[in-house]
Amino acid sequence: SITFCNTGHWASLGWFAEYALMGNRESAMYDGSLAEWTTDDDTPMERQVSLD
């Protein structure tokens, strides 16, 4: 899994729990989180999700 949040602060807690405590060595953290992702027009982002 890849953890992220708005700025990267809370994502580190999720990553630590998965990686260090639960032993998921495939866990990763995107430290740029949404603050970085949303500034790049080339990155995909769902802005509206249909609830159908």
Image (cartoon, grey):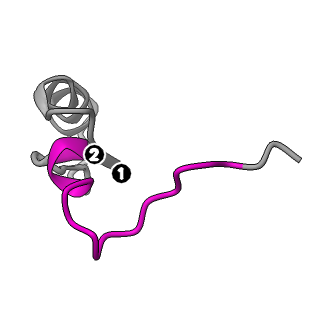
Question: Furthest-bottom residue in view?
Answer: 42
- Check if residue 52 falls in the magenta segment: no
Could you classify mark 1 by the number of other residues whose Cα lies within 10 Å: few (under 14), some (14-19), or many (20 or more)?
A: few
Q: Residue 12 in the image: x percent, y percent?
A: 13, 30
In front: label 1 or label 2: 1
Residue under the image location 23 percent in, 56 percent down: 37
Residue under the image location 27 percent in, 34 percent down: 5
Residue position marked by numbered label 1 in the rendering: 1
Amino acid, disc 2: Asn
Please determine whether, in this image, residue 27 is positioned above or below residue 22.
below
The magenta stretch spans which residues? 33-49
Cα separation between marks 1 and 2: 9 Å
- Do the CB atoms of the residues marked 1 and 2 lie less than 8 Å apart? yes
Q: Secondary structure at mark 2?
A: loop
Residue position marked by numbered label 2 in the rendering: 24
Q: Nearer the viewer, residue 9 or 46?
A: 46
Q: Residue 14 in the image: x percent, y percent?
A: 25, 28
Please determine whether, in this image, residue 40 is positioned above or below residue 18.
below
- Check if residue 38 falls in the magenta segment: yes
Could you classify mark 2 by the number of other residues whose Cα lies within 10 Å: few (under 14), some (14-19), or many (20 or more)?
A: some
Please determine whether, in this image, residue 34 is positioned above or below residue 5.
below
Amino acid, disc 1: Ser
